[in-house]
Image: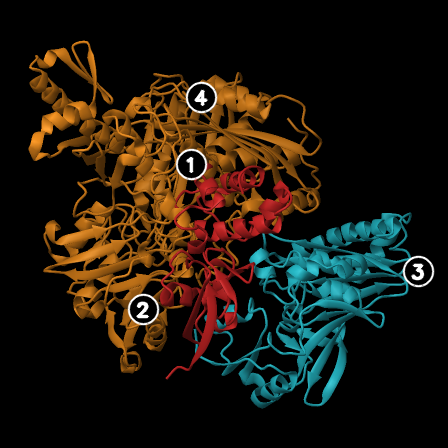
Amino acid sequence: MVETYPIEVTVNGRRRAFEVAGHHSLLDVIRDDLGLTGAKECCLVGECGACTVIVDGRTVDSCLVLAVEVDGAELTTVEGLATDGVLAPIQQAFLDKGAVQCGFCIPGQLMSAHALLVEHEHEHPTLAEIQEGMAGNLCRCGCYQQITDAIIAVTEGGR
Amino acid sequence: MSGTRLGDQVGRSPARVGGVGRVTGAQLYVADVDVAGVLHAKLVTLDCARARILSVDRSAALALPGVHLVMTADDLPQPVPRFGPQYEDRPVLAVGETKYHGEPVALVVADTRELAERAAALVRVEHEVLPPVVTIAGALAAGAPLVQDPAVRRKGDALAGTNVLHEHRVGWGDVDAAAAEPGIVIVEHRYTFPIVTHFAIEPHAFMAAPDGDGVAVWSTIQHPNWLQKLVAGVMGMPLSKVRVYAPDPGGGFGGKQHAKLEPAVVFAALAVGRPVRLVLTLEETFQAARRAACESRVRTGFHPDGRIAFQDIEADYLIGAYADIADRVVGKGSYPAAGPYNVPAVRILARSILSHTTPSTAFRGFGNPQVNWAVESNLDEGARALGIDRLEIRLLNLARKGDAFIPFDTPADGEWEQTVRLAAERIGWGSPLPEGRGRGIALGIKSGPTTGLSYSNVRLLGDGSVIVFAGTSDMGQGARTVFAQIAAQELGAPLGWVSVVMGDTGVVPYDQQTSASRSTVLMGNSVLMACRSIQAQLRAMAARLHDVDEAQVSVDKGIIRVGDRELTVLEVLRPGLGSLGGEITGLGEVRKDAEPSHPLGGSAAFFEFNCTAIEADVDRETGDVIIEKHVTVSDVGKALNPLQVRMQDEGAAIQGLGHTLMEHYIYDDAGRIRNLGAIDYRIPTSMDLPIWLHSETIENDDGPGPYGSKGMSEGALLCVASAVGAAVREAIGVPIRDLPLTPERVWRALHDTAAQGGGGEARG
Amino acid sequence: MHTFAYARPTSLAEAVALLEAHGPDARVLAGGTDLIVRLRDGSAAPAIVIDVKRIAELRAGIHEADGRVVIGATTVMTDIAADALVLRHFPALAEAAAVVGSVQIRNRATIAGNICNASPAADTAPSLLVHGASVVAEGPGGTRRISVDELFVRSGVTTLARGELVTAIELPIPAQRIASAHVRRTRRRGHDLASVTLTCGVDATGVTRIAYGSVGPRAVLATDESGVLADPSAADSVKSPILEAVFAGASPSPRSMRAGPEYRLAMLRVLGRRALAVAIERLAAGE
């Protein structure tokens, strides 16, 4: 019988309480228990960023976090970016700038882009800062330039 | 409704159809699809390249509560079914022997993924490790173990007692006579191209479920109809009882074209009577699909003025333990190896060499990048030997539109010189270079589809909205958007009113496959044809309504002219359908039949042509290559969606930089892949881009696709390595003929040259 | 993943007691960026995982006390890279922290984890060695300080005793400022494990310290007190033999996938010279 631990997490603004097994990753719980399949499984070693979510305001690879560790934390996933069905500016910018091809890496990219924009809220990040800030999210379709364009568009225009 | 003008869709870049789901996380990939009662599967594999299977002990695994099945080849129909698009050589599960690191021995099915993993670890496979061949030299050595039993090779195959699966010979003219001519300058070198893998961010995933007396299959497959036919054949079911759901793959690049584990998952699902899902890990995906490596010997003869007198090319491709589509890759990839040039004498011998490695499969470029690297690099060597500019030598030999540069194939179908000159202009060819920097320019060519068959259905509904049914797989290239644009344009519907249904063999008509950059041309024309059929019906409807001869009615995109009146589609459709309502349906069928006498089974529907020009700095102390400028220009006929074209070309360019600068499988002495997974297999990140990456297109409306379009998306990858290699060569004065150009390898080339007393050549 | 018990002690005493009780059957969970990978691939199979992030006495953060900069054990790389004290006194450490993995990794990876995993390629190790860092360890026998140089044994092995937990890292603020620079060799510009990682520090008395990793079982610290390396006017031909002696401690593995031994040894010299140049420049600029 696997021991479970009770945790409370605010998920996309909503307080949730549930039980998790100690060895389940945050990614497992997000996808399987919460049914939020935006965060993806790919490398499972913290290299590709497809599983990126935001915990207490910082991006993390959710495959490298045990679900129990986020007890009491605030969790944001891609499903939490849009408000009342209206896309966030960064989501719209991704579409407008052609930053989406197969789409599999995009939830993770959006999380990192969102965090980058919050970090640089009152300034324009340089190209190097954007590229470095986004380097933890691999895109095999090669959308990097368009993703960068989308981020720049948001910093210059509509946040 | 999207805010785009009616009848003005094509040539603009509206937002990707299906894009919203991708940015909200709502899009369901195979691993996200929830099916009630699904069980979870895990592969049992061995940690060696090749082994004889002695026994499989499942008892410990089966003893775990919640484990439903441990399936091996013994549980399958005997003889074990084998499958493959070219040779039916791959068993559903390993039979008697595993032939590559990662070949599945068993499939475990359990209540949860975790349980399936634990159970898989408990399956004891007693095995005897056998010596593998994992290199070309090893495979060709006298007395080398045979990868495939001669008894299963094709009847009458003279090569059955060797590891050479097939030899492809293409040629024209008399190479030996040309070589013997006085004054010919001959340049001969060997080149190698590494084993690399697709590394789509979505690992392969499969699910199967009993469906009445048939089966439903979900797969990341790029060719849903191929899979349907395969499953039906293996299971002995009619096609109508096999339904394949193919959600948009999270990246394919060719690695998901052909079935890998679907048959095993289907057998398992039918055995347990419940849905079964198998999602591969990234490591298992690396073991499941890769590109063929290649070792080439290129001997090029030049006249003193730079005209190519002959090309004599031998290319050995290292394919895997099972053929998959690899032999086709070798044949089709090597076929235009002499390049987009007018060469009077050509001799190409390309061989598919079997090995105890992951079966190589299709991968963007389909065998062309491997020989392009060799032939374009050798062309540069010739230019240097003759003292001729490397751009000029290419322009001198370049085929012009209409030239039969491959005598028995489609003639050159583009104003390729424009592409080359534009790239040269953008890179500033001929302008002074800073110290330590080099420039390279290379041309890439690939044959488009040689056969094809694409059906589509288009339904114009009673309110003027449209549904397009097209079996293409949209794995990011934006096919869905392009088809929606065509339908919107032709039927006068706002883009937001067009739905595109793909990926379900139960409702979408037959499409042969999504590959060879074919879909804009073949399926696009099919959708266009279906729309034309609807337009014809609208014409008849308008004639009837207005009591005129059909000859007085014309339909052009969304406007219907009756005499001198202009009507919208709805102004005809509503009254035409009347009080019962209804819809108008069109069927499109585009077929490119095989030409049996053609070496490739058919001539090229079009060519993909690209010119890539590079400026690179090399840090001579560390070997780092920094690409300052990367220009890529493709001849695309017409860009139906310019933004998507740019994304595809830049994406292909970046992917090409991967095998150029950092990607390769590292094998140990026992033939196992050492760098499985993301930590030690490096692909380009956002920080690894060229400082300036610029893509452009040449559009002369001269393609066979809708509105003059050609296929694209592979072109910009074809000659990346060649152009970068050429720039590095110029920067350091030392040739490197093996990829990837990692910092260590570049350093070694400089270091070894210095040690031998050479300082490298002066830049030329 | 293997199953294990999960403990989340809220006091140091509780944590130490758990560590002592379970010994090798326990693993400390701080950032998780190394441990979770090992749990998944089976190279770590503990009975219990002890999450140290809620221990009251272990506050993540950086402060100055008694002429030392004290970094809480669970301080993450993101915060170390941006900290004003670290940037002012130990610039190489900030540079190193800034290149540990990606943003996502740096938001979780802790300095204590980086040290205690004792990977030969740990990016913070060379700068900690150059700056004479120590760890503060709490154990059943009480508190002790261990210099980082005495802490590393080889990959995965430190001199921590059973039951001991690192609570802080201390870096002395030297009377003579050490200007330092960190450099590394990777296979691509994007995030990567280092094939060679190196820090060089010079001070106004002319002492040069060079520490390097990923070229042997543990990071190595070498010191030149002759003043020659730190002298901007000394010729390369004069510095070379000293650098050779500095790098004599390197023994790169021939089996590594990341880089071959000959290249690594050559890059040590290249990086050593480059880091030295930057350190000298920083010293002169009064950074």
Gap between marks 3 and 4 measured at Cα: 70 Å
In the rendered structure, the colour chosen for chain A is red
Disc number placed over residue B648 in the picture, else none: 1
Task: Reply above or below: B722 against A61.
Answer: above
Whether tag 3 and tag 4 are in contact, CB under 8 A, the answer is: no
Q: How is the image coloured?
A: by chain
Chain letter for orange, please: B
| Residue lying at 49% horizontally and 70% vertically, measured from the top left | A66
Q: Which residue is denoted by mark 4 in the rendering?
A: B309
Query: The disc numbered 2 marks a residue on which chain?
Result: B
Q: Which residue is denoted by mark 3 in the rendering?
A: C205
Between marks 1 and 4 in the image, the one whose residue lies nearer the viewer: 1
Instruction: Mark 3 vs mark 4: tell me if same chain.
Output: no
Would residue B717 be seen by someone viewing this image from the given angle? yes
Query: Judging from the image, what secondary structure is the residue with disc 1 in?
Result: helix
Gap between marks 1 and 4 measured at Cα: 35 Å
